[in-house]
Image (cartoon, rainbow, N blue to C red):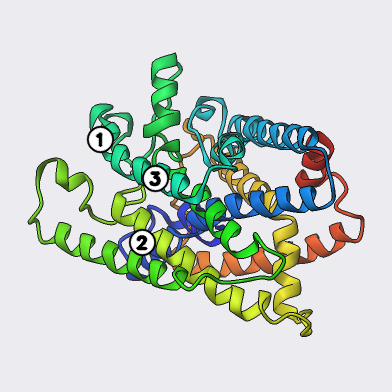
Amino acid sequence: MIQVHILEWLSGYYDSHTTLYQFSELIGSFPAPLFTFLVGMSLFVSVKSQEDRGVEPGLIADRNLRRGMAIFFFGLLFLIFVWMPEEVFSWDILTFIGASLLILFPLRNLSSKSIISIILFILIISPLVRIYTDFHSHWNRWGEYVPSFEMPGMLMGFFANAYFPLLPWLVFPLAGYLVGRACFGNEMLRLPKALLPAGIGLIIVSLVMIFLSSASVVTGIAAGYISPFTFYPASTSYILLALGINVVLFIFFFRLFDLREGEKQDNLFLVFCRRYSRYALTAYVVHHALFLWALIAYSYYLRELYRWQYYGYILPTAYSLLVVLAFIVLFYFVIVAWDKRDGRYSFEWWLRRLAG
């Protein structure tokens, strides 16, 4: 997340044609699917943990409602104060996560077959909705979404045309909830035998679809399904590839950590990951604000009329990667100091106070 964002902000136009930058963009295409996949999985684990402790169903629902609403409105405030007010209806990942929690909770008791049917329906309907709403007409020539302040445009952005619309991104939290239910639904941790073949199968199917689309053998409506690998819009081949990678990665780490019960699991790697995980929202906001506000301040310092004058025009990619590494290391020490104070006034702390 930090890597792909900082490289875009510092080098996105400086040398975006280089192999190093393009490889960074490719790697950076997969954190968002993983985060949203974990939203669904975390919801299952959270609800099950509360149910096992005997928490009243009404209180569980109230907590989820408040958490989803808090994240959604926090996402709007984030867009206003970090990306500036004109971007408030860009529908970024925080607004999507908040909305997905509100949508997923009422669906949690559906059978696995029903949830799979919803996922398939989203995959089928999403390309058609993009065609109907003329997806690309809502984006400018620099590859940026242009928010609308009229109700029809806002709704189309939220559902289909913005950075993280419900269609098709809702696939990831739904799939994460299913995998969480399959692996953590019983007293004993288990890994369904069909999960690994399913993940590998999704990867193979998506790669075949990408190959066929590059060979230009598919036209018309079918091209909306057998499509190139694109993040904006999130093409069907991209969704399937990211979903397959999510499943395979989860199985790898599940076997490496979850199934090795009783073994010592306090090595430096896990400690590092747990701390960053505990303050993931804070890290997300801080690295955005720090770098974007610095770019704006630099433009104003040089008396440029456009606040984003130097967006993407600061450093070559190799130097930006060093900045990424420096930020990750230095902010980790900030997290350690923050953690010693129980994370007081971090964004996670505020979220707990708002949502319980």
Residue 178, relative to residue 301: is it above or below? below
Disc number for residue 354? none
Q: CA distance from mark 1 to mark 3?
A: 17 Å
Q: Earlier in the sequence, mark 2 or mark 3?
A: 3
Q: Are marks 2 and 1 in contact (CB under 8 Å)?
A: no
Q: Point out the frontmost of discs 2 and 3.
A: 3
Q: Which residue lies under the disc numbered 3?
A: 117
Neighbourhood count class around disc 3 (C-alpha, 10 Å): few under 14, some 14–19, many 20 upward: few
Q: Are marks 1 and 3 in contact (CB under 8 Å)?
A: no
Q: Residue at x 37, y 52 (%)?
A: 13
Residue 337: give x, y in percent of width and height.
86, 62
Residue 43: give x, y in percent of width and height.
65, 48
Q: Which part of the image, by quadrant, shows the N terminus?
A: bottom right
Q: Residue at x 77, y 47 (%)?
A: 348
Disc number for residue 128? 1
Q: Residue at x 72, y 52 (%)?
A: 48
Q: Residue at x 71, y 47 (%)?
A: 47
Q: Which residue lies under the disc numbered 2?
A: 241
296 and 202: which is toward the camera: 202
Residue 51: give x, y in percent of width and height.
77, 48
Q: Which part of the image, by quadrant, shows the C terminus?
A: top right
Hey, what amino acid is under mark 1?
A: Leu
Q: Secondary structure at mark 3?
A: helix
Hey, what amino acid is under mark 2?
A: Leu
Residue 5 visible in this rendered orientation of the protein: no
Q: CA distance from mark 2 to mark 3?
A: 19 Å
